[in-house]
Image (spheres, rainbow, N blue to C red):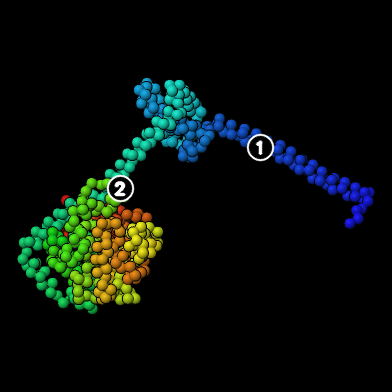
Amino acid sequence: MRRRAAEYRRPLRRRYSDWIWGVLVLFAIAALALFVLHHNYQEEVQHLTQESNINIGLSNGSSNFTEEIMSANSFARQISDQMTLAKAYVIIAKEHNNLQLAWELSSKIRKCQLLLSEASMRGEPITIDEARPLVEGLAKLIYKAQDAHFDIATTIMTMKSHIQALEERVHAATAQSTAFGQLAAEALPKSLHFLNMKLMGDWLTSPTMQELAKEKQNSPRLVDNNLYHFCIFSDNVLATSAVVNSTVSNADHPKQLVFHIVTDGITYGAMQAWFHRNDFKGSTIEVQSIQDFSWLNSSYSPLVKQLLEPENRSFCYGTLQDLKEIKFRNPKYISLLNHLRFYIPEIYPLLEKVVFLDDDVIVQKDLTPLHSLDLHGNVNGAVETCLESFHRFYKYLNFSNPIISSKFDPQACGWAFGMNIFDLIAWKKANVTARYHYWQEQNTDQTLWKLGTLPPGLLTFYGLTEPLDRRWHVLGLGYDMNIDNRLIESAAVVHFNGNMKPWLKLAISRYKPLWERYLNQSHPYVQDCLRS
């Protein structure tokens, strides 16, 4: 390509060069202007800051003391920081037997605390005249402590050892608190013991009551599948009464309800006396003793055999070894009464459908529609609890064991025991009790799951559970203080699962009225027991 002559190129180069230099000059001017403005601004800010530091606390208006103590420029913050350092040197001085220095530091700390308290009460900042003597005094003592070889390295090492000691004490206190809370949850209150004794006295001294109880056992209503059947397995008279009373109170046709209650031999007489002496709107109530189930023995049930083994009992009643396992040390886990839910068709062979209720629930709506729900061939109707990840299968079962990992999905949804509708015809067809026995035999060494009824329930009813609408069953009232009121109000059943049962003093006060509403507090025995 032919190049142009030089005279044609030179003016063009000069034109571009002038343009570039012009832009650079403009940038330089702009940068200089920005520098001047920024410098003037910084001087103004510094001046205002110094003026603020000098005059802080001189305003007669009120101030937010929390904001003041958080401000890096306030005298309150300076005093607070020096107090923190001084407290550390008090500990170190005592450990080095320098009691005079420790006393002087403690005296200054008390004066600082007094000044901070006065400033907080009057709602005004600390003035420079108030702060100067304390700040200077503490600074001199801190320098004195450093001169006494309490240097930063020594301070760090000392504080580290104290932190470790405090962590150990916190862990021990947490374990002790958890253990005491568990004991409080397990223990039956004195008032309930008193009620049981009074009712047992009535039962033993009333042959007429005993004869009537025998007659009720032959009532045709107990096996009438046109009625609505509920089962409760409990040794707590008042809790069972609240469940029954809340169910009949919210039923459209309470006379069509039949309650099947099973208790232990110790509570049997008291339970009979209570339900004989109180009316529950014409509903039918049957009370049985688990001791009468002669078929439920170690040759039939692997569970019974395991519960009789000393290892399981020592696990629940022995010395605490692991804080994480304390929830499994509750004796209810080795109570056969707690495991009766897996033998409902054997207990009631002529029934077709039954609603299972725990003794720590309260019913707020009519539950009879549960009996007409279509379970689509499934055995168990339950509300799923997998809205949070910790309610999935892998949180309850040991998936490192191939027996579990090869047959179950670790992300499968858990579901709630406490309010369940069981189709007993489908139960027998699927041979569910045999499945339960199989898993109990596989878990003789407790490597698949710890004690309890939910883990074996998840295995036993896997693939046989129909999810119910969440509004049928709301859980957590025994441990969660922040359940939405709208959720509670819309629930058919609220469940006080957890340690804070409504009949205990450690119950959550916000939820306790839900349970007390269905407690027969007008009964003279209940009044006497509540006063005791």
Residue 30 visible, this orientation:
yes
Is label 1 in a helix, a strand or a loop? helix
Residue 36 location, quadrant: top right
Tell me which amino acid carries mark 2.
Answer: Leu
Q: Is residue 184 above or below residue 61?
A: below
Is label 2 in a helix, a strand or a loop? helix
Q: Nearer the viewer, mark 1 or mark 2?
A: 2
Q: Residue at x 36, y 62 (%)?
A: 405
Q: Which residue is mark 1?
A: 41
- Image coordinates of residue 302 in percent, x first then y, are 21, 63
What separation in Å lies between label 1 and label 2 (alpha carbons)?
60 Å
Tell me which amino acid carries mark 1.
Answer: Tyr
- Image coordinates of residue 359 in percent, x first then y, are 24, 62
Q: Residue at x 17, y 63 (%)?
A: 298
Left or right? Give the position of 36 relative to 76.
right
Residue 218 or 275: which is nearer the viewer?
218
Dot 1 or dot 2: first in sequence order is 1
For mark 2, does the 10 Å Cα neighbourhood hold few (<14), some (14 to 19), or many (20 or more) residues?
A: some
Quarter containing the N terminus:
bottom right
Q: Residue at x 28, y 44 (%)?
A: 176
- Image coordinates of residue 384 in percent, x first then y, are 36, 65
Residue 517 visible, this orientation:
no
Q: Residue at x 25, y 47 (%)?
A: 320
Left or right? Give the position of 231 relative to 144.
left
For mark 1, does the 10 Å Cα neighbourhood hold few (<14), some (14 to 19), or many (20 or more) residues?
A: few
Q: Which residue is mark 2?
A: 323
Left or right? Give the position of 338 relative to 384.
left
Q: Residue furthest bottom?
A: 226
